[in-house]
Image (spheres, rainbow, N blue to C red):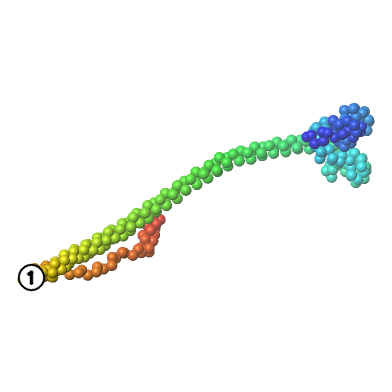
């Protein structure tokens, strides 16, 4: 406690205070301490090294507020320090004891309290370590276990949903492939007919320029036979059908799957 270690001596006001008198409330240098101890009225005062004094303690009054006299006894009935004037006035006929005796008991109580507080602090520290190790470790382990369970559960659900999604997409893709083949087949048929017609048109254009009637007649009859074998223009096919996606079916499948898991099936 070095809060007042540089306080000047209250007697000579020249040297730094080295000691402290509780009763006088004075800081004393080494020289003034010797003078202080030789004065009969202050010889029995409590003097200590100023380094050991707290400022708050140093400013505490050791005199009776009512009579401005030093405390000399302890009133057992009132649990209060009293001066010589108090003995014959406000505390008359009360039971007194020496301050030293009272302080001795209070010191013993303080030591017991200190021991109890240290034990309490040790118990608190032990409890803290126990809670830190057991509670936090358990919290971490159980949280990890639950998180793993959550991830596993959602993984199963995700796999089911993914499998259903794959099936649905495959069905649509297969249907698209089949419908595409039908459309492309129709387009190829049209190309085939048009090629036949185009070839026949060319042949007709050629014989129309023929000047010899018999040759024209013979050729035209031959072409007519070929014309009779020209396929008719195919009718336009139906528009490709794509099965509509019914979300309600998917939701029901997922719900049924979740319910089966909830039932432990």
Tell me the element at label 1: loop
Residue 1, by quadrant, is: top right
Residue at 21 percent across and 65 percent down: it is 190
Residue at 87 percent across and 34 percent down: it is 8
Q: Tell which of 232 and 98 is nearer to you.
A: 232
Q: Residue 119, position in %: x, y?
A: 67, 37
Label 1 CA crowd tier, 10 Å (few <14, some 14–19, many 20+): few
Q: Residue 217, position in %: x, y?
A: 7, 71
Residue 130, by quadrant, is: top right
> Would residue 92 be visible to someone looking at this image?
no
Decide: is 184 above or below 114: below
Residue at 45 percent across and 47 percent down: it is 148
Position of residue 212 in the picture relative to residue 118 (left or right): left
Residue at 75 percent across and 37 percent down: it is 110
Q: Residue furthest front?
A: 211
Dot 1 corresponds to which residue? 212
Q: Tell which of 147 and 65 is nearer to you.
A: 147
Q: Residue furthest left?
A: 214
Position of residue 115 in the picture relative to residue 256 (left or right): right
* Quadrant placement of the C terminus: bottom left
> Would residue 70 be visible to someone looking at this image?
yes
Q: How many marks?
A: 1
Q: Residue 215, position in %: x, y?
A: 7, 69
Q: Tell which of 212 and 183 is nearer to you.
A: 212
Q: Tell which of 257 and 201 is nearer to you.
A: 201
Decide: is 258 above or below 36: below
């Amino acid at each position: 406690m070095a809060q007042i270690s540089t306080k000047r001596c209250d007697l000579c006001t020249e040297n730094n205070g080295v000691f402290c008198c509780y009763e006088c409330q004075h800081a004393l240098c080494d020289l003034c301490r010797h003078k202080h101890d030789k004065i009969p009225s202050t010889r029995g005062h409590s003097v200590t090294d100023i380094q050991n004094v707290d400022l708050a303690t140093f400013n505490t009054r050791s005199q009776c507020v009512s009579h401005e006299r030093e405390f000399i006894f302890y009133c057992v009935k009132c649990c209060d320090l009293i001066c010589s004037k108090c003995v014959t006035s406000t505390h008359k006929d009360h039971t007194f004891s020496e301050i030293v005796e009272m302080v001795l008991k209070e010191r013993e109580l303080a030591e017991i309290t200190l021991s109890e507080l240290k034990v309490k602090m040790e118990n608190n520290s032990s409890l803290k370590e126990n809670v830190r190790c057991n509670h936090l470790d358990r919290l971490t382990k159980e949280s990890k276990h639950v998180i793993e369970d959550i991830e596993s559960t959602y993984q199963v659900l995700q796999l089911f949903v993914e499998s259903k999604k794959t099936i649905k997409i495959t069905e649509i893709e297969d249907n698209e492939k089949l419908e595409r083949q039908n459309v492309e087949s129709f387009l190829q048929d049209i190309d085939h007919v048009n090629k036949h017609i185009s070839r026949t048109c060319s042949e007709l254009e050629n014989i129309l320029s023929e000047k010899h009637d018999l040759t024209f007649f013979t050729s035209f009859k031959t072409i007519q036979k070929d014309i009779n074998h020209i396929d008719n223009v195919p009718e336009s096919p139906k528009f490709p059908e794509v099965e509509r996606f019914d979300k309600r079916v998917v939701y029901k499948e997922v719900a049924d799957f979740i319910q089966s898991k909830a039932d432990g099936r």
